[in-house]
Amino acid sequence: MVVQATLSWFTVAARDLPWRRAECTPWGVLVSEVMLQQTQVDRVVPIWQAWLARWPTPADLAATDLATVLRAWGRLGYPRRAQRLHSASIVITQQHGGQVPEQDDALRALPGVGEYTAAAVRAFAFGQPAVVLDTNVRRVIARACEGTALPLPHLTNAERILATTLLESASVAGARWSAAVMELGALICTARNPRCGDCPIRAYCTWYRTDMPDNAGPRRQQPRFAGSDRQVRGLILARLREGSMPTETIDLIWPDAEQRMRALTALQAEGLVVQKRGRYALPSS
Ligand code: SF4
């Protein structure tokens, strides 16, 4: 019943996201999944649309220098994703004839593609019965089926087995079930304020029926962004997207010299920033 109720709800409530449309290519799906890994849908949509208009195939992105790619990534955050997507486009172009591969091992061999992203591409791009387990799906399953407020910090085999059982019980293509439960977690069964009153599976939800006990265990603390190295890295990259800068200008970006150097050193080690003749810049290739 959980599955059928979720699917019925999805039929009327699904958002019209561009990577869900029939005309979206496997490349478009892969780009969306990489962008969505740590960024909200609303921020991803315009960048994804501009990205696919500019680089409609992996070969188009592979032929572009990394600095241009990092500029186009804009403020989506975690720019190593852009770097890895660029590397993946080169692998796809050189080793897969420019076509996103369908097989799990080939997908997971691509830079930046792990278990989740490979499963999502297999399901949403190729219609394969892959078990797609992102944080939204895991939360819905934890609450509805196991009666716990949140899933464990790390994915377990028990969760994979349970998710596989649910997938197999869906009488529709696996991709539709995966998209439906993911949407339910994103729109209704949210982490902090689940809208149980609007939930299509309320009657079957174990956690709801047991009065929503606070049984999630110790919460993981979200690292603070303000004052973090991540903030410093973001400020440096934002300035470098406008052009190269001498060391003295970089020094003005952040007052703490030790933290500034730590961020710069890390960005250089990751290949996101280069230093040439006393100036810092985005890498050209
Ligand atoms: S009833 Fe509430 S807790 Fe249960 S799945 Fe729905 S929104 Fe989540």
Image (cartoon, rainbow, N blue to C red):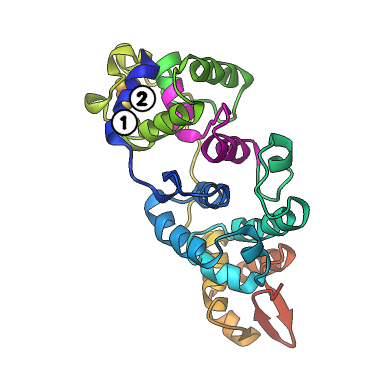
Q: Magenta residues, as a range?
A: 114-141
- Residue 105, placed above or below residue 206: below
Quadrant location of the C terminus in the rendered image:
bottom right
Camera-nearest residue between 76 and 94: 94
* Amino acid on which the number 1 mark rests in the picture: Thr
Query: How many C-alpha atoms fall within 10 Å of the one at disc 1: few (<14), some, or many (≥20)?
Result: few
* Amino acid on which the number 2 mark rests in the picture: Leu
Query: How many C-alpha atoms fall within 10 Å of the one at disc 2: few (<14), some, or many (≥20)?
Result: many
State how many labels appear. Answer: 2
Residue 82, percent from left and from top: 60, 60
Q: CA distance from mark 2 to mark 1?
A: 6 Å
The tag on residue 11 is 1
In reply to whether residue 130 is colored magenta, the answer given is yes
- Magenta span: predominant SS is helix
Contact (CB < 8 A) between labels 2 and 1?
yes
Describe the element under mark 1 as helix, strand or loop.
helix
In reply to whether residue 49 is colored magenta, the answer given is no
Left/right placement of residue 210 relative to residue 236 reads: left
Quadrant location of the N terminus in the rendered image:
top left
Camera-nearest residue between 192 and 271: 271
Residue located beneath label 2 in the image: 7
Residue 73, percent from left and from top: 53, 64
Describe the element under mark 2 as helix, strand or loop.
helix
Residue at the location (35% across, 35% down)? 192
